[in-house]
Image: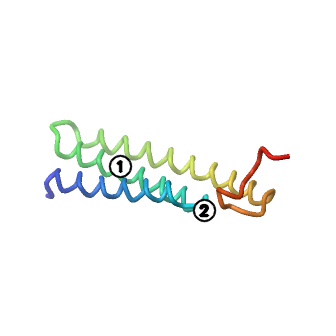
């Protein structure tokens, strides 16, 4: 089994890659994918901590399943919103969307 420090370094890098994607992407779909990468980094942390601590390993797995279900529901709602914006604005780039303009 890998040491916990190696897993934490990996998940930190994964989270930072997702954060970089959120901050630099102009495409809304790319931003959603970057948020999913950040959530997966948190999931790996939950599993790693539950496996390395003296608690039941199922606790971390329950949290991970909950986060995966929540992320799937969020992604489906966000993609429906993106589709609606695309139908009205004909673009999915964040700097070109101006919903509050007359």
Side (left or right) of 42 relative to 51: right
On the image, which quarter does residue 79 sit in? bottom right
Q: CA gap, disc 2 to disc 1? A: 25 Å
Name the foreground residue: 73 vs 92: 92
- Residue that appears at 66% across and 61% down: 93
Mark 1 highlights which residue? 43
Secondary structure beneath dot 2 equals: loop
Location of residue 9 in the rendering, given as x and y in whole percent from the top left corner: 23, 55
- Residue that appears at 47% across and 54% down: 36
Task: Judge the density around disc 2: few (<14), some (14-19), many (≥20) Cα neighbours within 10 Å.
Answer: some
Disc ID at residue 27: 2
Secondary structure beneath dot 1 equals: helix
| Number of marks present in the image shown | 2
Indicate the quadrant containing the N terminus: top left, top right, bottom left or bottom right: bottom left
Q: Contact (CB < 8 A) between labels 2 and 1?
A: no
- Residue that appears at 22% across and 55% down: 7
Q: Point out the frontmost of discs 2 and 1.
A: 2
Location of residue 42 in the rendering, given as x and y in whole percent from the top left corner: 35, 47
Comes first in the chain, label 2 or label 1: 2
Side (left or right) of 33 relative to 62: right
Location of residue 59 in the rendering, given as x and y in whole percent from the top left corner: 30, 38
Location of residue 97 in the rendering, given as x and y in whole percent from the top left corner: 72, 54
- Residue that appears at 30% across and 42% down: 60
On the image, which quarter does residue 82 sit in? bottom right
Name the foreground residue: 48 vs 58: 48
Q: Is residue 73 above or below residue 27?
A: above
Name the foreground residue: 62 vs 29: 29
Side (left or right) of 99 relative to 47: right
Task: Judge the density around disc 1: few (<14), some (14-19), many (≥20) Cα neighbours within 10 Å.
Answer: many
Disc ID at residue 12: none
Name the foreground residue: 101 vs 34: 101
């Amino acid at each position: 089994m890998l040491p916990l420090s190696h897993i934490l370094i990996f998940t930190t890098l994964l989270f930072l890659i997702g954060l970089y994607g959120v901050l630099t992407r102009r495409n809304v779909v790319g931003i959603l994918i970057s948020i999913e990468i950040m959530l997966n980094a948190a999931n790996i942390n939950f599993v790693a901590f539950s496996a390395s601590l003296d608690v039941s390993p199922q606790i971390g797995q329950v949290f991970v399943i909950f986060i995966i279900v929540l992320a799937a529901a969020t992604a489906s709602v966000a993609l429906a919103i993106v589709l609606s914006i695309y139908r009205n604005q004909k673009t999915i780039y964040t700097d070109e969307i101006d919903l509050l303009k007359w």
